Image (cartoon, rainbow, N blue to C red):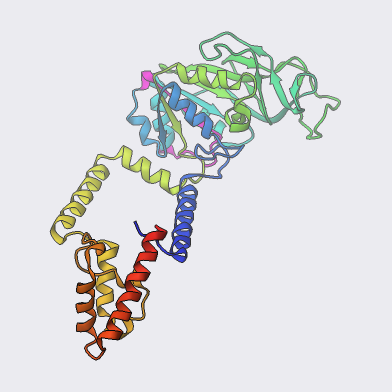
Amino acid sequence: MRRPPVPRLVLYALILTLSVAIVIAASTSTATFGGYNIDWDGTSEFRELADQQSESQIALETTAYERSNTSETTAIILAPEEPYTANDSRRVRAFVRSGGTVVIADDFGSEGNALLSAVGADARFNGTQLLDEREYYQAPSLPVATNITDSQYTSDVAQLTLNGATAIDANGSTVLATSSRFGYLDRDGTGGLSPGDELSTYPVVTVESVGDGRVIAVSDPSVFINTMLTQPDNEAFATALLETHQQTLLDYSRAGEQPPLSIILLAVRSSVVVQMGLVGVGIGFVWAYGVFGRFTSRSIWGGLLEIVPEPLRDHFPIWLREITSGDEDTPTELIDEDTLLRSLSQRHPEWDETRLRQVMTDVLSERSRTEDDE
C-alpha cells in the first residue's frame, strides 16, 4: 500500500490528537464529588465500585426515584450543591417512605439538612468542623472515627478516615460511628483546642427509619472521593452500603455540571424514544449508502482532479496524478509501456516519439522507485 506523504501524516496525527482531547474533555468533569471527575476530589472510583457491587444507575433527574424498585434500591446523595425543589423532595420522600434507603452525605452545606428535613429524618449535620488531636490521619482536621457499631451498613469496618468532617446531631437516630473520645468541635474556628471545647465522641454516621425505608446520614462526603476511598476502612464502608440492596441509584441531580458526552449517553440509555431515533438514523445512512453508492476519499479527490486543466495536472506529483475518479480497484501495475505510450501520444500529439519515450521512461522510473520504497 502506498504511504501518504509526511505532511499528510502530520495532519492525521494532529486530527487524532485533537479528537482524543475533545472526547476526554467531553466525558470527564472537574466538579468536586463528581462521578466523572477522575482527579483526587472526584468520585469516579466510587462510581466504578458501585458498578461492581450492584446494578448501579446514575440519575441526573429525580424522576429516576419514581422508576426505582424501592425495596431493592439504595440511593446515594453526596454534598448537594443546589436545593431540591418541592417536587424533587417529594419524590425522594415517597421513595423512602415506600421502602427505599437513601444515604445523604454532607458536611458544611445547607442543602443536606434541608433534604433530611424534607424526607422526614430527625438527624442534622452540625456544620462545625470536627477535629481530633489524638486519633487522626496526617492532621487533626482528618480525624479517624474509631468507634463503629456492628450493623449491615458497617460490615468489615473497624474505623473511618475522615477529611474535613463535621458531626451529626443524632436527635434520636441510631448512631453507627463516632469519633474517638478525643474529638471536639472547633466552634471558634481557631483550628486547635480552645478553652470551652468539649472532648467527646461525636456521631459521624447515623441511621433511622422513615416510613418503610431508611435514611443514613454521613457527616463527611469526602469518605467517598478518590483520594480518601483507599484509606482505612472507607472502601469497606462504601462496599457495605452498596451491598445492602441489589440496585444503587447515584443521585447527581444536584451535584453541579456533568460532562456533555456523559449526559448524552445517559439520555440514550434511559429513553427508548431516543434509542429508536438513533436506530432510524442508522437505517437512513445505510439506505443512502446503498442508493448513492460508495463515496471514498479517493473517488471524490479523483473527481476534483478531473476539473483541473490538463496542462496544470501534468505538473502534479505522480502519486497525485494516479488518483482518478474511475475504478479505484484497477491496479496501476497492469499498465504496460505501449499503453502508456499511446496515452501520452493522445495527450500530447505535438511531441515527437523521442520525447514521448523519454517522458514515459521518467514516469516508469519514478513509479518503480516509489514501489521499492514501500
In the picture shown, does residue 194 fall above or below 288?
above
Front residue of 89 and 69: 69
Residue at horizontal 52%, vertical 35%?
44
> From this viewpoint, is residue 17 visible?
yes
Does residue 292 show up magenta in the picture? no
Quarter of the image with the N terminus in it: bottom left
> Extreme right residue here?
195
Does residue 77 show up magenta in the picture? yes
In the picture shown, does residue 365 fall above or below 190?
below
Q: Is residue 185 left or right of residue 47?
A: right
In the picture shown, does residue 304 fall above or below 283?
below
Measuring from the top left, give residue 147's x and y in whole percent. 67, 12
> Extreme left residue here?
291
Q: Is residue 209 left or right of residue 294?
A: right
Q: Which residues are magenta?
A: 70-87
Quarter of the image with the C terminus in it: bottom left
> Extreme top residue here?
150
Q: Quadrant of residue 156?
A: top right
Measuring from the top left, give residue 213's x and y in whole percent. 43, 18
Residue at horizontal 49%, vertical 46%?
257
Measuring from the top left, give residue 190's x and y in whole percent. 81, 34
Measuring from the top left, give residue 373's x and y in whole percent. 42, 60
